[in-house]
Image (tube, rainbow, N blue to C red):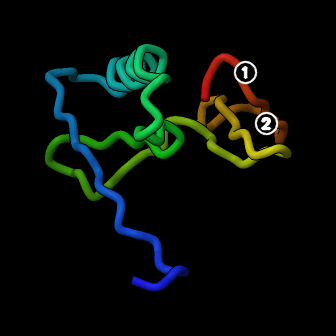
């Protein structure tokens, strides 16, 4: 590997028994809140999919990069064009 190559990242798929996208989104938010101290988890890249349609994914958070390196923590479909950083989140 050269100095410019980035090692492949791994994805952990965590199936649930939830039957609604709102429930899955709430679980993702709770996991982010409780595991924010784990730096190996990139919560900004969190996506949701139906069990039998895992190739169709919906992003949970906007994740737009903000000045200073922070990322927008608002839902992906937040109104307006203005993003913000929640300082309580990584």
Q: CA distance from mark 2 to mark 1?
A: 13 Å
- Check disc 2 and report its element: helix, strand or loop: loop
Circles 2 and 1 in contact, beta carbons < 8 Å: no
Q: x%, y% of residue 18? A: 21, 21
What residue do we see at 34% from left, 18% from top? 23
Label annotation for residue 42: none
Q: Residues within 10 Å of mark 1 (few under 14, many from 20)?
A: few
Total numbered labels placed on residues in the image = 2
Of residues 76 and 1, the one drawn nearer to the viewer in this rendering:
1
Q: x%, y% of residue 66? A: 79, 44
Of residues 19 and 64, the one drawn nearer to the viewer in this rendering:
64
Residue labelled with disc 2: 83
Residue labelled with disc 1: 87
What residue do we see at 72% from left, 21% from top? 87
Name the quadrant of the N terminus.
Answer: bottom left
Name the quadrant of the C terminus.
Answer: top right
Q: x%, y% of residue 43? A: 48, 36
Q: Residues within 10 Å of mark 2 (few under 14, many from 20)?
A: some
Compared to residue 33, the image places residue 84 above or below, namely below
What residue do we see at 48% from left, 16% from top? 33
Q: x%, y% of residue 6? A: 46, 71
Image quadrant where residue 81 sits = top right
Classify residue 79 as left or right of residue 88: right
Mark 2 vs mark 1: in front? 1
Classify residue 3 as left or right of residue 25: right
- Check disc 1 and report its element: helix, strand or loop: loop
In the displayed orientation, state which residue is furthest to the bottom: 2
What residue do we see at 39% from left, 25% from top? 28
């Amino acid at each position: 590997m050269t100095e410019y190559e980035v090692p492949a990242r791994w994805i952990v798929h965590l199936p649930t028994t939830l039957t609604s996208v709102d429930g899955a989104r709430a679980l993702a938010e709770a996991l982010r809140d409780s595991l924010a101290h784990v730096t190996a988890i990139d919560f900004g890249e969190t996506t949701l999919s139906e069990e039998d349609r895992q190739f169709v994914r919906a992003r949970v958070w906007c994740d737009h990069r903000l000045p200073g390196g922070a990322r927008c923590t608002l839902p992906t479909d937040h109104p307006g064009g203005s993003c913000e950083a929640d300082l309580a989140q990584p």
